[in-house]
Amino acid sequence: MSKQECIREVADLNQINRCIDSLEKVEGSIDRLTDILKLAANDVRLKILYLLSREEHLCPCDLSDILDMSVPAVSQHLRKLKDGGLVKTERDGQVIFYSLNPLFKDILSPNFDQINNNNILEVLAA
Amino acid sequence: MSKQECIREVADLNQINRCIDSLEKVEGSIDRLTDILKLAANDVRLKILYLLSREEHLCPCDLSDILDMSVPAVSQHLRKLKDGGLVKTERDGQVIFYSLNPLFKDILSPNFDQINNNNILEVLAA
DNA sequence: GTCTTATTTAAGTATTTAATTAAATAATAT
DNA sequence: ATATTATTTAATTAAATACTTAAATAAGAC
């Protein structure tokens, strides 16, 4: 208790300690969600994730065409998504198909809904 | 049409063009959501946003104590959140209170729910 | 085996990010 | 006015990002 140091006389010490406590409880979730959001918080990767939410699977070569960027660049984004566990791979001959890890669909689907509904743009316009 | 260049004989050109088209439709939403996610995809800022989802408002000094980091560091994060429109400010004397911009509550609340329910950790464990 | 295709990896570079420290504003109190 | 407090800004630095290019794997076709 009383870890706070804020000097203000009117500082709400209860609030400060309440905040410290509630952060402590969700620390693990925050850290993990930060990792996931970092992966999604990129133009290219968000597009890949969005596409994979609508398509069964896609390969680096296709994505290179769709996103109009080099194959190595795409591949390096896919690697990050795979390292983070957001996507999984399946080989078919020389082609490697990437698909969404179903475990993450629940976490990411609100964002995909927002994209589909153009919610974000409406907020902007407001 | 036929913007694709993928060489594979078995490439699904319909899929490629379908993806290109669907990205075009949501381009604006993706860009804007990327900006928002970039702001949320940081340890410190996600904590600030989470706390502001539970508290009416907080000031830089309080946040400095709660997050155990320097005031200027906190202030610079708050500035980013404000520039992005995620939070708004209200002055009371020398103290500046930051609060969530209600327009963004809908966009961010799924993430806060995930934090509260520790959904993410469950996914990890699976 | 060699050749082609699909993908990944590695090295190099430019940009962005987030902290620290010190200085600058802004409001209040005396 | 000066002093104190709360906050912001600016300059610097260290680390993380994301691309490019070239080289390395891996599978199939011949």
Image (cartoon, coloured by chain):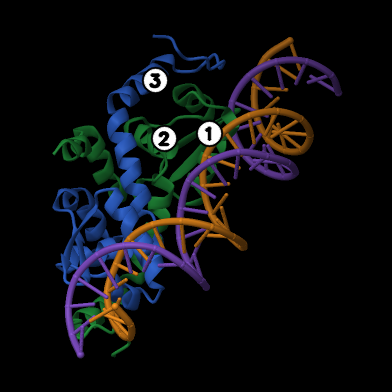
Chain colours: A green, B blue, C purple, D orange
- How far is the residue under mark 2 from the one under mark 3? 14 Å
Q: Please give the residue where the numbered disc 2 appears in the rendered image.
A: A48
- 2 vs 3, front mark: 2
Residue C5 percent coordinates (x, y): 63, 19
Residue C4 vs B108, above or below: the answer is above
Residue A12 percent coordinates (x, y): 18, 81
What residue is rendered at 35% in x and 41% in y? B34
Specify whether A16 is left or right of A70.
left
Residue B64 percent coordinates (x, y): 34, 74
Query: What amino acid is at disc 1?
Result: Val
* Few, some or many residues within 10 Å of mark 2 (<14, 14–19, 20+): many
Image quarter in which the N terminus of chain A is found: bottom left
What residue is rendered at 42% in x and 51% in y? A38
Q: Please give the residue where the numbered disc 1 appears in the rendered image.
A: A74
Q: Please give the residue where the numbered disc 3 appears in the rendered image.
A: B15
What residue is rendered at 47% in x and 52% in y? A84
What residue is rendered at 27% in x and 43% in y? A111
* Few, some or many residues within 10 Å of mark 1 (<14, 14–19, 20+): many
Residue B17 vs B44, above or below: the answer is above
Dot 1 and dot 2 residues touching (CB under 8 Å): yes
